[in-house]
Image (cartoon, coloured by chain):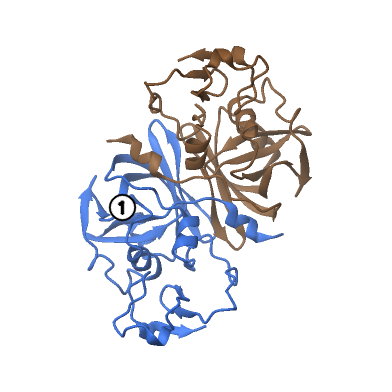
Chain colours: A blue, B brown
């Protein structure tokens, strides 16, 4: 069984949000798909380890914000690799309330949903949401997970369904520095030590001190 | 509520197969996603109108074959727009049995799965399958639904979750001929009437007689 076959499935990159007693919370989701057209329903898979999972359970509503290729990659670092347990992800993220749910700025479309069903698996819950409100916010090409991996050198969060230990090959030729927070790998032409002191991880926005040599 | 927001979700293009009393059956699926990593499970959404749905229910197993950008578009026409009720889709489709399930030739990877859970919705069943066997078959870029729509001018099957009546805008400038079987729209530079008699729909392989002027 060659599990790299699983990497051939195609996904988008979304921020799945909800409310935590009046405060906005959210996490990155790749596994979202439309299930029925009338009424429109979508399914999203969320790890039970994610704080957002608990909030969706309590609130009974979630929103999917669709990220685009030109969306700020820091959104992925912030919502994909930090936990709402110890970080207010919305402290530096502007958002609007659309369809009664928080929608972070930077996306191209949103779907506000009411939970109408769910399926439990060993680690994730697949929430089925009836779309109560949705709109396109601006033009832009939806970001695919493949684009994120190729263009942004994104790594996979351990809470993502698509995470598999030691599945990410490295380029042995180059000196590579890894962000401890989000796993971003720096292998730019400027040696890492020569990057300015205020340089930050392009993915999650953390400083140079969070990087270690691979 | 602007339902075109739903078109911003990203999907792949897959053939979902199973057995019908020893005979291979299958249909196109866009809605497939990995749910857990250990054990690896995937969810796939199949309309209860699809004959393949009944076969997955009876057999308890399904396979996902991942199509690539260079896969023969006729596979999509055959498996996406014809029904196994009145067509033997495998009559002209070579396949191998992999992980005890039929895997049509032309894909780049397959996942053979055992049904371990399901979620019913108004029109579709979301099957949860534990991956019992999978492999990469060849190199190639996975076909996304966006690529299919843009490059192959694909239309949406009425059984697809992403189908919405009157949601596909037409180019009013050009004379367009539509395939009655799969919805493929011909608007090439050669006038349709001047195409050779043995010309067939590039999507589903049906002859000129199945086309009507839009």
The percent coordinates of residue B29 (x first, y second) are 56, 38
Chain on which label 1 sits: A
Q: In the image, what residue occupies the spot 29% across and 35% down?
A: B2
Element carrying mark 1: strand
Residue drawn 29% across the image and 82% down it: A198
Q: Residues within 10 Å of mark 1 (few under 14, many from 20)?
A: many
| Residue A93 x, y percent position in the rendering | 24, 63
Query: In x, y percent, where is residue B62?
Result: 67, 43
Q: How many labels does the image show?
A: 1
The residue that label 1 is drawn on is A107
| Most foreground residue, B22 or B143 | B143
- In the image, A57 versus B144, the foreground residue is B144
Residue B82: give x, y in percent of width and height. 62, 24
Position of the C terminus of chain B by quadrant: top left
Instruction: Tell me the residue at 23%/47% (across/down).
Output: A98
Determine if residue B205 is in view: yes
Left/right of residue A32 with respect to residue B106 in the rendered view: left
Residue at image position (52%, 17%) is B191
Q: Is residue B202 left or right of residue A187?
A: right
Does A37 appear above or below B130? above
Residue toward you, A126 or B9: B9
Q: Is residue A21 visible?
A: no
- Quarter of the N terminus of chain B within the rendering: top left
């Amino acid at each position: 069984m060659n599990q790299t076959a699983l990497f051939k499935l195609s996904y988008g990159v979304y921020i799945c949000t909800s409310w935590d007693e009046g405060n906005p919370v959210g996490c990155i989701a790749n596994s979202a798909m439309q299930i029925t057209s009338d009424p429109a329903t979508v399914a999203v898979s969320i790890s039970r380890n994610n704080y957002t999972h608990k909030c969706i359970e309590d609130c009974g509503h979630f929103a999917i914000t669709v990220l685009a290729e030109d969306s700020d990659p820091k959104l992925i670092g912030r919502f994909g690799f930090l936990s709402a347990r110890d970080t207010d992800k919305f402290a530096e993220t502007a958002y609007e309330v659309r369809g009664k749910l928080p929608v972070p700025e930077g996306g191209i479309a949103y779907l506000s949903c009411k939970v109408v069903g769910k399926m439990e698996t060993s680690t994730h819950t697949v929430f089925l949401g009836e779309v109560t409100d949705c709109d396109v916010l601006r033009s832009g090409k939806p970001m695919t997970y493949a684009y994120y991996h190729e263009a942004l050198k994104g790594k996979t969060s351990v809470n993502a369904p698509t995470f598999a230990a030691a599945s990410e090959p490295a380029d042995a030729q180059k000196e590579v520095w890894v962000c401890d927070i989000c796993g971003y790998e720096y292998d730019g032409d400027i040696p890492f030590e020569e990057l300015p002191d205020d340089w930050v991880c392009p993915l999650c926005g953390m400083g140079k001190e969070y990087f270690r040599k691979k």
